[in-house]
Amino acid sequence: MGPAASTKPTIADLDRPTRRVRVERCVCFDQPFEKLLKLAREEGLTLEQLSERTGCCTGCGMCKPYVRVVLTTGRTSIPLMNGRDLNAIAQQAEAQARADNPG
């Protein structure tokens, strides 16, 4: 097993320089992540409520793990990653938020 196989993705991976394409919107509904994050924060929307309101994540569904990362980390430009890594990063951000704001 090589080092890459044992390395878990982290929130810091979102900010590292990369040659990968960056994902910045829900393509199906042309919804920029920056706009989605602003709306979610201003109105306290969950991912499901945001989807109902804007249509994001309801077309092909490929942006759903990205939108989850956007909502949990506040970042609106995410390197192209697989869903497993995106979900791991979102889980880390959720755990960190719970630790920072207990109760």
Image (cartoon, helix red, strand yellow):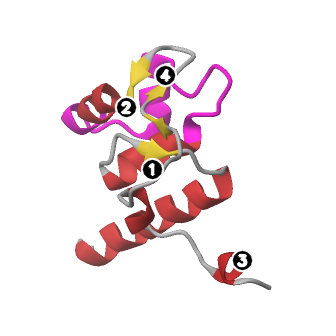
Q: CA distance from mark 1 to mark 3?
A: 22 Å
Judge from the rendering whether residue 95 lies leftward or rightward of residue 59; answer left or right.
left
Residue of label 3: 5
Of marks 4 and 3, which one's residue comes earlier in the chain? 3
User: Residue drawn at (50%, 34%), measured in percent from left and top?
Assistant: 48
Residue of label 2: 33
- Viewer-nearest of discs 1 and 3: 3
- Viewer-nearest of discs 4 and 2: 2
Query: What amino acid type should be assigned to the residue bearing mark 1?
Result: Val
Query: What amino acid type should be assigned to the residue bearing mark 4?
Result: Glu
Instruction: Give 82 or 45, whichever is nearer the viewer.
Output: 82
Residue found at the very far right of the displayed protein? 1
x, y percent for residue 53: 42, 19
Q: How many marks?
A: 4
| Rendered-image quadrant of the C terminus | bottom left
Badge 3 marks a residue whose secondary structure is helix
Instruction: Give 16 or 57, whichever is nearer the viewer.
Output: 16
Judge from the rendering whether residue 63 lies leftward or rightward of residue 83; answer left or right.
left
Residue 85 shows in this picture: yes
x, y percent for residue 85: 61, 60
Q: CA distance from mark 4 to mark 3?
A: 37 Å
Magenta-colored span: 40-64
Specify the label residue 52 is tagged with: 4
User: Residue drawn at (42%, 29%), measured in percent from left and top?
Assistant: 50
Specify the label residue 49 is tagged with: none
Query: What amino acid type should be assigned to the residue bearing mark 2?
Result: Phe
Q: CA distance from mark 2 to mark 3?
A: 30 Å
x, y percent for residue 16: 39, 61
Badge 2 marks a residue whose secondary structure is helix
Residue of label 1: 69
Of marks 4 and 1, which one's residue comes earlier in the chain? 4
